[in-house]
Image (tube, rainbow, N blue to C red):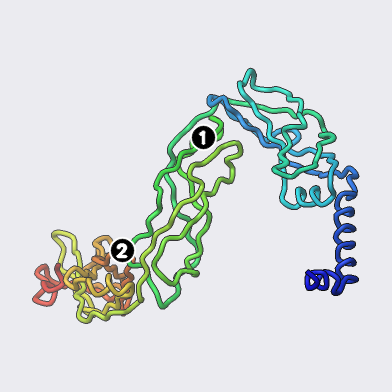
Amino acid sequence: MASLSQSLLRNWRLKLAALGMSVFLWALVQTEPTNPETLPSVPIRVQIADTGWTTSGAPAPATVELRLSGPTREIIRLARDGTSVRVPIGVVGSRDTTIILRREWVQLGERSGLTVESVSPASVSLSFEPAQTRLVPLAARLTGEIDDRFALASSIEVSPQLVRVRGPVSRLEGLDSLTLMPFDLSAVSRSGAFTVAVDTMGLLGASVVPPLATLTMQVEERIERVLDGVTVQLLASEGEADVVAEPSSIQVRIVGARTLVMALDPARLRAWVPEEVLRGMAPGEERIVPLRIDGVPALVTAVPSIDRIRVRRAIDGAGGAEGAEGRP
């Protein structure tokens, strides 16, 4: 028992000072000033239960001024976290109406001790119009280029492909698709799924579900493959003498994702000159014409060693052996 008494008395001055400080802090909290404070530009949010209608524009005014009383620290937290005035509309009776704002519509959360003294202005004007719900396809909006070390191995997939849009009829008329917010390909260095928001610019008063979409892309190492001896095909018009290409074959460089490049069948590759650029050539006439490359799969690039070649119309109708080889 003596040991307990000695323990209580040891450093009794420090213990008494700590107790006094605790009492002081408690009294300070209890006597915290509760002077009224003003929050400017608090947004108004309209919640419509009548599914046949929606707002046709922003409320007027779109923001109000709140005068609050309560603990200063709670008002500061509310201002930091943000609040709004939620206006519930059960049934729409007319296209235009004025609503008297109620103090209980101010969203205070779970903060205790706060009181809404006033809302200014005290009313808000709302406009409504019939609502419409539609399924609208999504499209990706891509910017930038993938790093030269990588390449896409498959087409980019957007999921979901359709979103549900609900809003004023006037804003949904003619809406045939929505795009995602721009996605920068230069930041992609691996395969994966990337979340992107739907761009709702211009859809004031409308809602989009879901508001987010996923871009799925497969990325592989970028490689090059060189194909030699690709024959140039010339399409001469029927009844005209054959045309000879100089050179008769070229080199083509294939660039893209490893899987796609290695799977390319060289026999499917076609270098050719369109018929329209050869039309009207006189026997013995020469022209420099553009060269086209076909048979390259999507996401793979074919780079010919030359993009223009010299062609010559044969002097006789048969065109000789050289001219015959020029036909596909």
Q: Where, by quadrant of the figure, is residue 323 drawn?
A: bottom left
Residue found at the very far top of the displayed protein: 93
Q: Which residue is mark 2?
A: 298
Quarter holding the C terminus is bottom left
On the image, the x and y values in percent for residue 17 come to 90, 67
On the image, the x and y values in percent for residue 145 come to 46, 69
Task: Reply above or below: 278 against 31.
Answer: below
On the image, the x and y values in percent for residue 129 come to 59, 26
Q: Amino acid at mark 2?
A: Ala
Most foreground residue, 256 or 8: 8
Q: Is residue 117 left or right of residue 171?
A: right
Q: Is residue 77 left or right of residue 240?
A: right
Q: Is residue 156 left or right of residue 248?
A: right
Most foreground residue, 57 or 39: 39
Most foreground residue, 23 or 33: 23
Q: Looking at the image, tell me whether mark 2 or mark 1 is earlier in sequence order.
A: 1
Q: Amino acid at mark 1?
A: Arg
Q: Is residue 17 visible?
A: yes
Q: Which residue is mark 1?
A: 166
Q: Is residue 308 visible?
A: no
Q: Is residue 135 left or right of residue 245?
A: right
The residue shown at (87%, 45%) is: 37
